[in-house]
Image: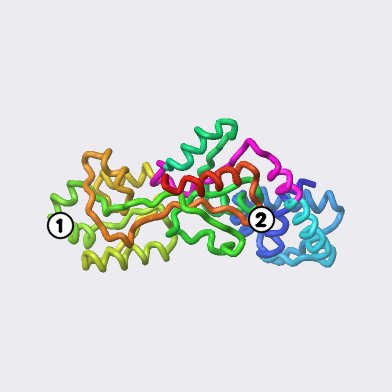
Amino acid sequence: MDLNKIHYFFKAAELKNFTKAADECHIAQTTMSKYIATLEQELDMQLFIREHKNLILTSQGQKFYDGMKDIALQYQELCRQIHRNTANELHIGVVTTDYTDFKIIESFEKKYPSVSISYVFSDERKMLYDLQSSKLDALICPDMLEFYHSIKEQIEDVSLASIKVSLVCSKELINKYHTVENVIKNVPFITKADETGYHQFIKEEIYKQFHQAFNETIIVKEFPKQLLLLRLSHGFSVLPIEEVNTNENLVAFEISNQFKETEKLIYLKNNQSKSLKLLLNHINENKCLL
């Protein structure tokens, strides 16, 4: 039995649906079904009663679920203890790629060259799960995003950088619509954030300053695609000013300090490896670099 995959069974039992469970675990539905079938064969017992698209735990399945929950927690805690004793590695998930100039981390790498830092760029939900599973030590993300608020009581955070952002569009759009207000009125807002709360915040703050509201939002997954759509005049964005200066056909408009982003390093309160503690101490000692 692979304890690293037992969460497939937990999700199936909790969501009562293989398709939904597979989606939550970022695997194919056929992979989920095959895993459960293999698990039932290994245990020589039926774990689920299948009724149309719904799943119901059998009495044996319920006992297995309750017992394995405790075992899985003990296993995760053991992994965390072992992980905390690893002094020379840091695994950091990066939720945003809009801004990557973290001087505080650069200075840490120079001061502690023996600590190997690896960066992971992936789906927000997967990285949050990996943080909870001790596969990642910490995540870097903007304070405006809310994807981690479901476990807010389990985490702590520290600021890495305060970022000045601007409203950005192509020069062609300004030539066509003449004013930034008309650009906002006529083209979509392009963003990588898929949280409706963030979209509403942007809409309200833009309206306060420019007295115009955008009617459509385009969500993209990668920052290069966002820049491409901007250069092709398919909309406008709110971006760090540093990213605009290197693109000749883009123009930036100053916006209020309400849009200022703070990049955070978030981590679990009860899961701090020696390397992470080194990084946190370095950040606290060098706040002037933030």
Figure quadrant of residue 89: top right
Residue designated by label 1? 179
Q: Residue 173 or 270: which is nearer the viewer?
A: 270
Residue 184: in sight, yes or no? yes
Alpha carbon distance from label 2 to label 1: 51 Å
Vertical arrangement, residue 115 with respect to residue 213, above or below: above
Q: Residue at horizontal 31%, vertical 52%?
A: 165
| Image position, residue 33 (x, y; %) | 70, 52
Disc 2 packing (10 Å; few <14; some 14–19; many ≥20): few
Task: Give the residues drawn in magenta, as a range.
Answer: 78-101
Q: In this view, does 245 lie to the left or right of 35?
A: left
Q: Residue at horizontal 19%, vertical 61%?
A: 181
Q: Residue 211 or 286: which is nearer the viewer?
A: 286
* Mark 2 or mark 1: whose residue is earlier in sequence: 1
Disc number placed over residue 270 in the picture, else none = 2
Vertical arrangement, residue 198 with respect to residue 8, above or below: below
Q: In this view, does 166 lie to the left or right of 5?
A: left
